[in-house]
């Protein structure tokens, strides 16, 4: 089911001064490179202004006067000018690339850094693919505006003013003919503006949808294949891909109409200048060289106007991208350290939940939860799906903030200490073990980068995975690939156990961590945990109640409330929810065991 997404619906305007100011803050650290880039671009364009003058000299003073020597000098001068311009353009390309990549690097770093500090609630509301699009296509669009488009605007405006001065000084009548078409071009651009704006907004939304669809299907490829959903998913992707194609083609159609209109207007201007200028040449009032010079300047004059007219499209995409980027950057984390937050001392492990209430938005999840845990105890959380078990451990690590009440560790309210000092002393093993691209050794060392190789091996031995790892072709250096695709679910879970244990947490959280392993692997883990959990405060969420019978305390959660607590033997004496859950599982396991011999 798709999550609600708000950032892709941001529409914006063609140019938003507020957004532009915020975006241009990224270019301030690179203003030296920007100035150098502007100088090189202006130099390239300035050298180009020499070209028409050489044509005039070649025609009027070389060819017109049959002066071969002078014509040779002009040709050599032309080659020199061309060579200098080529050198400047090469240097310009390097400078512009360094500027662009520098700004791109900073923008992606800033957005990624901010994403890292946002709470889980932010990611609960957004699809992975759309977040990825913010760091890729949207950042690219804004970077284009800040670098190449900024340079284009500066140089195009400068060229227009310079060429207008040259045209007027060369021939006022021809200059007036040329300038008379500018208002027509402006009107034509305005007519296309609204339609192009909406078209390219639609393109941005459709691209984000395609990205999200790809990310979801790749992330859930195992589920897709398990349920043979390839055909259905292909149909859905075909639909979003088709919608994207149609949006792009519609925008391209508008652009295909707009560009020729500008080209026709340019051609009309050139025809008028050639006709009127030709008459002046025939009348002997104007030389052919001056007319050719004027026409070449005229071509240079219309080029930046065309660039500025089509820049609207790029600016619209950049503004839409900037809206979505700053929607992320302007999102303030609801979970932050207090100004006077302190580093929590080494944790002993006493935990207290005092009348804790919590809600996701307006939906209540936990209501008046109270319990105490002594250091070194193993606490099991059981209850129906959606009862609030995972929420309790998320609140313990302050992934969310409670609505009322308090949670204390060793007497310290978790809201009064820094999150880093708190989470550094906690280890978590989730139901879906995630391994990062890299070696098994690197994955085990993930939570404690300064651990030695021997400590990595010791952690693996403690959870009973050392022998398996050594049998792999590269041993501990075996690359597991993204998500641990080269390992089984049980093997990935054991690696994640070793990772959590190597971090030496004072509080260990196991969120249904044995649900993905087979019975033999589970026995291995249970044996290892007897030693490894000793002296550590541990919270274990488990659906298989057989795995938590030796817990010091079992907390039964139902509907967001703590309805029962006690040891396994104590709870089994009462006809409560725990006993009902236990009997259901026991009877089911017994029925399966009786069916297996009959089937064989």
Image (tube, rainbow, N blue to C red):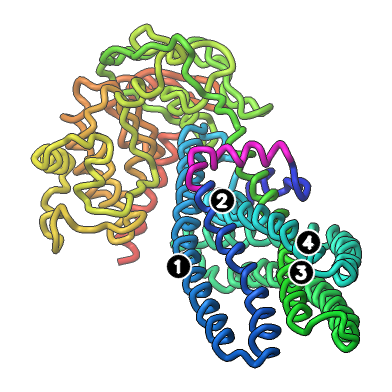
Marks 3 and 1 sit apart, C-alpha to C-alpha, by 25 Å
- Kind of element beneath mark 4: helix
Q: Distance between the residues labelled 1 and 4?
A: 27 Å
Using the rendered image of the protein, determine whether residue 246 is visible from the camera's viewpoint. Answer: no
Cα distance in 3D space between marks 4 and 3: 11 Å
The residue wearing badge 1 is: 87
Which quarter shows the C terminus?
A: bottom left
Residue identified by numbered label 4: 164
Q: Is mark 2 on a helix, strand or loop?
A: helix
Q: Could you tell me residue 306's position as x and y percent?
A: 75, 67
Element class at badge 1: helix
For the residue pair 21 and 279, the one nearer the viewer reads as 279
Answer yes or no: do the residues labelled 1 and 2 have beta carbons within 8 Å? no
Q: Is residue 19 magenta?
A: yes
Closest to the camera, between mark 3 and mark 2, is 3
Q: Where is 528 relative to 297, above or below?
A: above
Mark 2 highlights which residue? Answer: 139
* Vertical arrangement, residue 249 with respect to residue 143, above or below: below
Where residue 145 appears, as percent x and y from the top left, is 63, 52
Closer to us: 510 or 301: 301
User: Which residues, given as a range, are shown in magenta?
Assistant: 17-34
Q: Earlier in the sequence, mark 1 or mark 4?
A: 1
Eye-nearest disc, 3 or 1: 1
Q: Which of pointers 1 and 2 indicates the residue nearer the eye?
A: 1
Q: Can residue 425 be seen in this view?
A: yes
User: Is 429 left, or right, of 521 in this rendering?
Assistant: right
- Between 31 and 214, which is closer to the camera in this rendering? 31
Q: Mark 1 or mark 3, which is nearer the start of the sequence? A: 1
């Amino acid at each position: 089911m798709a999550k609600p997404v708000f950032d892709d619906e941001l529409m914006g305007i063609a140019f938003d001064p507020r957004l532009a100011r915020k975006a241009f803050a990224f270019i301030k650290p690179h203003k030296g490179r920007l100035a150098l880039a502007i100088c090189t671009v202006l130099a390239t364009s300035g050298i180009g202004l020499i070209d028409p003058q050489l044509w005039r000299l070649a025609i009027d003073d070389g060819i017109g006067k049959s002066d071969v020597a002078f014509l040779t000098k002009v040709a050599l001068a032309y080659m020199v000018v061309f060579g200098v311009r080529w050198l400047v353009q090469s240097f310009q390309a390097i400078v512009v690339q360094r500027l662009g990549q520098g700004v791109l690097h900073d923008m992606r770093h800033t957005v990624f850094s901010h994403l890292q500090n946002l709470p889980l609630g932010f990611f609960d509301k957004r699809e992975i693919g759309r977040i990825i699009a913010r760091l890729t296509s949207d950042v690219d669009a804004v970077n284009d505006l800040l670098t190449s488009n900024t340079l284009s605007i500066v140089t195009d405006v400068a060229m227009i003013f310079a060429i207008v001065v040259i045209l007027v000084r060369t021939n006022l009548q021809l200059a007036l003919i040329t300038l008379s078409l500018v208002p027509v071009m402006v009107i034509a651009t305005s007519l296309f503006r609204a339609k192009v704006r909406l078209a390219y907004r639609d393109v941005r939304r459709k691209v984000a949808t395609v990205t999200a669809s790809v990310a979801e299907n790749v992330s859930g490829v195992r589920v897709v294949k398990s349920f043979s959903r390839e055909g259905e998913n292909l149909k859905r992707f075909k639909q979003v891909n088709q919608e994207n194609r149609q949006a792009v083609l519609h925008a391209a159609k508008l652009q295909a109409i707009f560009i020729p209109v500008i080209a026709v207007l340019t051609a009309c201007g050139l025809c008028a200048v050639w006709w009127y200028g030709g008459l002046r040449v025939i009348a002997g009032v104007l030389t052919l060289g001056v007319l050719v010079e004027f026409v070449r300047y005229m071509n240079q004059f219309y080029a930046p106007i065309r660039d500025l007219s089509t820049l609207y499209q790029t600016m619209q995409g950049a503004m839409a991208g900037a809206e979505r980027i700053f929607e992320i950057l302007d999102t303030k984390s609801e979970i932050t350290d207090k100004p006077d937050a302190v580093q929590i001392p080494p944790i002993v492990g006493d935990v207290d939940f005092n009348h804790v209430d919590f809600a996701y938005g307006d939906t209540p999840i936990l209501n008046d939860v109270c319990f105490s845990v002594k250091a070194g105890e193993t606490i099991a959380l059981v209850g129906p799906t959606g009862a609030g078990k995972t929420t309790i451990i998320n609140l313990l690590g302050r992934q969310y903030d409670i609505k009322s009440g308090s949670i204390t560790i060793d007497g310290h309210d978790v809201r009064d200490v820094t999150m880093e000092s708190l989470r550094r002393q906690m280890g978590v093993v989730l139901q879906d073990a995630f391994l990062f691209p890299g070696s098994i050794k690197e994955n085990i060392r993930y939570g404690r980068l300064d651990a030695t190789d021997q400590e990595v091996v010791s952690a693996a031995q403690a959870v009973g995975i050392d022998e398996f790892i050594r049998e792999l072709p590269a041993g501990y250096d075996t690359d597991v690939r993204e998500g641990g695709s080269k390992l089984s679910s049980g093997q990935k879970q054991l690696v994640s156990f070793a990772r959590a244990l190597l971090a030496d947490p004072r509080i260990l959280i196991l969120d249904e961590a044995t649900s993905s392993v087979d019975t033999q692997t589970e026995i291995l883990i249970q044996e290892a945990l007897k030693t490894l959990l000793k002296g550590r405060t541990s919270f274990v969420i488990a659906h298989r109640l057989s795995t938590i019978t030796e817990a010091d305390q079992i907390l039964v959660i139902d509907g967001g409330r703590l309805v029962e607590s006690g040891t396994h033997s104590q709870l089994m004496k009462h006809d409560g929810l725990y006993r009902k859950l236990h009997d259901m599982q026991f009877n089911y396991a017994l029925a399966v065991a009786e069916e297996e011999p009959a089937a064989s």
